[in-house]
Amino acid sequence: MMNIRTDIPQIAALRESVENATGIRPRTHADFIALGLTIERKLKEHISESTLERVWGYSTRGYDTVSKRTLDVLARISGHQGWEAFCKSIGADEDSGFIDDPSTLDPETLPQGARLKLCWQPDRTVILRHLDGARFTVEHNEHSKLSEGIVLTCKGFRKGGALYMDLPQGLYVAGKEHGITSLEIL
């Protein structure tokens, strides 16, 4: 059985898709139980709350992979045929990710203090300053929901793809429909 790392952008997109489809935004153990029951009721498939916690990064057991079977079920609850179909629907396949794509920027390669200008439709512009690792702060914001001064985490940037950022209030997606239209190091 194939296991897939839970830190790839496709899994972040799948979590959001499942949350939107079920109306459940799991943040507590009880939420994961409720999500598991919803999946079982709708699909007649069982996924334990501990497995769901692993997918959402809630588990403290140190697991960083999940089975393809689990991803297939989660993709189906969000309205897709399976994991591969879900990945195709967001413009990726299950083996791709920010690191393997030549049009990407890995934040680990940026010097501390580097500034990035990102644009997406309809008229969003954000300038991020690199703090360290995958952490950034918003220096400038035009028409997006990102507040200036907020600290966020982003594991990679890809022109033409949606951008997933972890914020204190949850996962934020920029360019969900048409992708990031401009990515520039200032």
Image (spheres, helix red, strand yellow):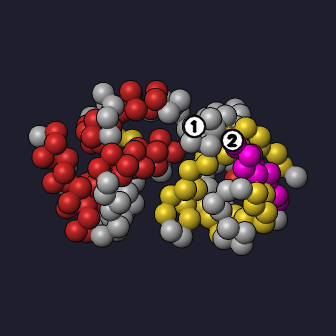
Q: Give SS at disc 1.
A: loop
Determine the residue positioned at 33% across, 62% down: 26
- Give the side of residue 49 with respect to residue 60, left or right: left
Mark toward the start of the polypeptide (1 vs 2): 2
> In this view, which residue lies farthest toward the right?
186
Q: Look at the numbered disc 2 and give the secondary structure of its residue.
A: loop
Magenta segment main secondary structure: strand
The picture places residue 33, in percent across and down from the top left corner, at 19, 61
Q: Nearer the viewer, residue 30 or 121?
A: 121
- Magenta region: which residues? 114-125
Residue at position x 67%, y 34% from top? 160
Left or right placement of residue 168 versus residue 64 in this view: right
Q: Mark 1 to mark 2: distance in Å?
A: 8 Å
Q: Which percent across, then down, holds residue 49? A: 22, 59
Relative to 57, 144 lies left or right: right
> Residue 129 in the image: x percent, y percent?
77, 63
Please tell me which residue is depicted at 16% across the width and 39% down the height of the picture.
43
> Residue 134, image x and y in percent?
64, 59
Q: What residue is pinned by disc 2? A: 121
